[in-house]
Each structure stands twice: as C-alpha cells, then as structure tokens.
Amino acid sequence: MRIDIITVLPELLKSPFEASILKRAIEKGIVEIHFHNLRDYTDKTYNQVDDYQFGGGAGMVLMIEPIDKCITSLKTQREYDEVIYMTPDGITLNQKIANNLSIKGNLIILCGHYKGVDQRVRDAFITKEISIGDYVLSGGELGAAVLCDTIIRLIPGVLNNETSALTDTFQDNLLAPPVYTRPAEYKGMKVPEVLLSGNFPKIEKWREDEAIKRTEKLRPDLLNK
Ligand code: ADE
C-alpha cells in the first residue's frame, strides 16, 4: 500500500511513523508513506496557501490551486483508490471503514486546516470524507495519523501474529475480552482459573462469553448493529 499525505504541517505528522508497528511496516516494505507540503505547490509570495473567506467571516480557508496542483501531479503518476479528506463533518471512523481501506492499494489523504478547504476541492477531488470523532482538532494531521495507524495494522504481515488484529476490540462488533499475564496471583488478585487450565476449547468459550458480557455492560449499542 502507498499513502500520500498532503499537509501544511508535515513535521506534525512524521513521528507516529518513526516508531513501533508503523515503522516496522514501512521497513518491511508493506507500506510506503509520502508527505507532501502544500506550500511546495504554490507560486504565491511567502508560500501562501490560504486566504480569506468570500462573504466574510472569521478564519482562513485553504485555496484550491495548490491542492489541485498536488493531487493532479500525484494522479498523473499512478491511480488512487480513494482521495480522503480529514474533516470533523465527515463520516465517523470505525473499524469497518478501517477494514475496507486496509485492502486498498493507493490512498491520498488531505489534511484540512484553519476553517477547512475551499468547497470546490471537496466537490472536485474528494471521494471520502472522514472524521475521527465529534470534536474539532486544529487540523487534519492528528486525524490522518489515527487513520493510518488503524489501517496499516490491519494489512497482512504488519502484526507479527496475524490473528491478533482479528481478535481486536470492535472486530465482529464485540469488545475484546479481559487479558492477564504473569504473575497468576498478585496481592490476592487471581487470574481466572480457566485461563490456567490448558483446556483451549474451554478458554475460547470463556473468552467469547466475557467479550459478550463486557460489550453488554460497556457498549450495548454495538450488539444491535
Ligand atoms: N480536522 C479537524 N477536526 C477533525 C476531526 N474531528 N476529524 C478529522 N479531521 C479533523
């Protein structure tokens, strides 16, 4: 998979890709991440990429021309499955959206800033608008990092134990069951007996039951989906 991220703040986005699972996915050649600074696509003085809103109102808007130049230049080099815009008024990211995106080949992610982008960008170039939750961030960069993390960990070969993404919370609309590690007893608090039994069908059944119990208690809305 190849992900091209268009942003006015590439430095804000780099560190999540320089550690742990994302770093390993890049090193293994499973995913390529390319950052594009929107300011490299403007001819204006001071590398201006934003301007005042027509009609008045507070806040600057990212202009269409540098975004058009950047996206068009990328599209002449390869085909893209989706051109995603990170915005608080997009569809809210969930595991199903992440699963669908994890099987794509090439993605562009455009990060908004200030009041967002000129509406004509959304009308002409964007195929999917994604929000990471009902709150407003200063820009789309942190949202793009969250989106990339959730997609990339699902690509086969990224996690060492491939089944571990399959047992994540939200796969199958269930929360994950409780997990324990050594010691088997700590200050009188014991690990459930069944997990020490070595009886794997029984352990599997316990995990399923606990996942359902936990979902009923904490996120009953998931069970109705
Ligand atoms: N940009 C600003 N707020 C955002 C949000 N909640 N999700 C995605 N992008 C954003």
Image: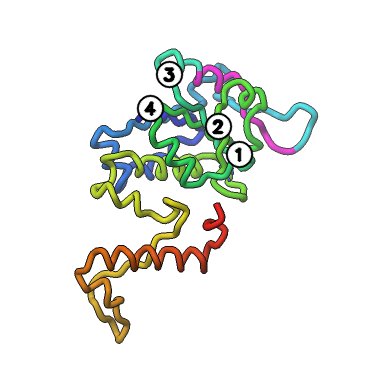
Labelled pair 1, 3 in contact (Cβ < 8 Å) = no
Q: Tell me the CA gap for discs 3 and 2.
A: 16 Å
Q: Amino acid at mark 2?
A: Lys
- Which image quadrant is residue 145 in? top left
Residue 61 left/right relative to 30:
right
Q: Amino acid at mark 3?
A: Glu
Q: Earlier in the sequence, mark 3 or mark 4?
A: 3
Near mark 4 (Cα within 10 A), the count class, few <14, some 14-19 or many ≥20, is some
Q: Earlier in the sequence, mark 2 or mark 1?
A: 1
Q: Tell me the CA gap for discs 2 and 4.
A: 15 Å
The region drawn magenta spans 58-71
Residue position for label 1: 90
**Which residue is rendered at x = 44% and y = 37% of the image?**
100
Residue position for label 2: 128
Q: Give whichever of 76, 50 is nearer the camera.
A: 76
Labelled pair 3, 4 in contact (Cβ < 8 Å) = yes
Near mark 3 (Cα within 10 A), the count class, few <14, some 14-19 or many ≥20, is few
Labelled pair 2, 1 in contact (Cβ < 8 Å) = yes
Q: Secondary structure at mark 4?
A: loop
- Which image quadrant is residue 184 in? bottom left
Residue position for label 4: 105
Residue position for label 3: 79
**Which residue is rendered at x = 47% and y = 43% of the image?**
96
Near mark 2 (Cα within 10 A), the count class, few <14, some 14-19 or many ≥20, is some
Q: Tell me the CA gap for discs 1 and 3.
A: 23 Å
Q: Earlier in the sequence, mark 1 or mark 3?
A: 3
Q: Give whichever of 111, 15 is nearer the camera.
A: 111
- Is 80 magenta? The answer is no
